[in-house]
Structures are given as structure tokens and as C-alpha cells.
Image (tube, rainbow, N blue to C red):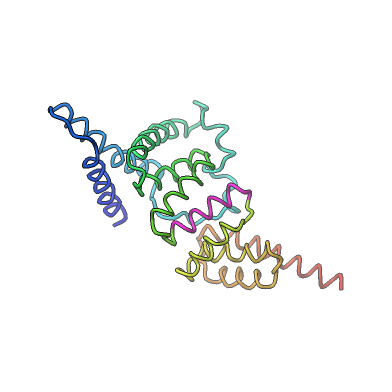
Amino acid sequence: MIWVGLTVLAVLAGSALYASLPKSDGHGSRARRVTFAALPVIAALGLYAIIGSPTLPSRPYADRAGERNLAAAAAVADNATDPDFKTDQQIRRLLNQIVVSLEVNPRNLQGWVALARGSLRLGNIERAVAAFAQAYALSGHNPLLAIEYADTRITAQDGQIDSTSRDLVLHALGQMPNHLLARYYYGMMLKQNGKSEQALRVLSDLYRDLPKDDPLGNATESEIKALQSSADAVISAD
């Protein structure tokens, strides 16, 4: 159903772009308009086919050390011996097409989302943050995009949650109180604000609700242990 929805949205975006392009006489001009209008459709769907399902990633910043969507992976992205090199090259070409389409139609929500996720995949965190900001605004503050935007900002800031990320997390949590990643970052917000006891309760409750194979499990368990160790150290000191 996700793919069907994305296809419909992409086709609608392409149709709108086609209608907005200047008209002129001649079969060649019409063909160029059709081709250019199809770019966001082809590029967005092609990008999703390469990087996987467009659903929200469930792993937070703290549990992504080995993943190629971190900025540290950018250093090997141009290495032809890297097994992901060919895929990275394909993503770059698709992103270039999306950028061109967004210059003509900057209100293409799916284009901005595809640009954000593709940039994140290649390690271009700054462009991913900027693209998610555009997508979030165009979406009417969609809570799923709010947490994905917050997650990307937190990645860019080495795990620190600034005021913008805090507002995004709180917005997502207000709309989706049981969203696992939103709950995780709420616990991390409490921890970073020095509210260790509250953070421990939030993360412990989250850990009990997590499926056994959920990628959030390792990060959540690690934070719980760190908070418990800090609490034990305070008790011992007293």
C-alpha cells in the first residue's frame, strides 16, 4: 500500500509539473514537457527502489555507528572498490534529477523527502537536514516526518538535541504517544536536561514495550544501564 500511495503522489506531482511548464507548438516541445514532468516520478521511485522501503527508520542516532547513512561513510562513498559504490552512483544520478525537478516545482513534497533520504544514505547530512525541513513544512507538520527530521538533526549534531529537535519530538509524541522512536528521543531529552530519574522511567517503559528484535532495543538498553550506573554511583557517594 505504501508503494501504491507513493506512486499516486508521484504521478500527481508529475502531472502538476507538466501543467505548469510553458506551452509551445510542436510535437518536440510536448515530448520535452512530458519527459521533464516525469523526472520526479522516475527519480523518486527509482531512489526508493535502491535505498529500500520509504517507511520511517526505527533505529536512532545512538544505534547507527556502522550504518552507511552517517557522515563518516562519505569518505568511502567515492571508492570504486567499495561494494556499495555502484549503488551510491545510482543514487547520485537520481538525486541530481530530483534537484532539477525541485528547481521547477519546489512544492513537490515527495521530491524533498526522496532528496532528504537519499542524501542521508550518501552521508550528506547537512543537505538531508535542509531537505527534511522543506518536506516537513510542506507536509503541514506531519508527525512522522517530524520525528524523521528530528532524528536527522540529532545525527548532524552528534546526538545532541537542540530546541528545534525538541519541538519536533514533542510534536510527534503529542500526535503519536506510542511511537517508539519518539519515546526514545523523549527519554534522551530528559537525560540531557539532567532529569535522570524521569529519563530512566521513560526508557524502561519503552524497553518493556519493544519487540524483541526491534533495532531500538540495543540503544535503549545501553542508555538504561548508563542511567542506572549513574544512580548507583550517586547512592554510593552518599
Find the residue positioned furthest to the right.
238
Find the residue positioned furthest to the left.
26
- Residue plotted at (53% across, 39% down): 123
Q: How many marks?
A: 0
State which quarter of the image contains the C terminus.
bottom right
Pinpoint residue 21: horizontal percent, then vertical percent: 24, 37
Position of residue 56 relative to residue 238, above or below, is above
Position of residue 195 relative to residue 118, above or below, is below
Q: Residue 24 sits in which quadrant?
A: top left
Give yes or no for residue 147 being in the magenta stretch.
yes
* Chief secondary structure of the magenta portion: helix
Q: Residue 98 sits in which quadrant?
A: top left
Q: Which residues are magenta?
A: 145-158
- Residue plotted at (49% across, 26% down): 80
State which quarter of the image contains the N terminus.
bottom left
Give yes or no for residue 21 being in the magenta stretch.
no
- Front position in the image: 50 or 98: 98
Pinpoint residue 220: horizontal percent, then vertical percent: 60, 62
Pinpoint residue 235: horizontal percent, then vertical percent: 82, 73
User: Does residue 220 appear to the left or right of 42 in the view shown?
Assistant: right
User: Does residue 65 appear to the left or right of 148 in the view shown?
Assistant: right
- Residue plotted at (42% across, 33% down): 92
Position of residue 137 relative to residue 169, above or below, is above
Pinpoint residue 203: horizontal percent, then vertical percent: 61, 68
User: Does residue 160 appear to the left or right of 103 in the view shown?
Assistant: right
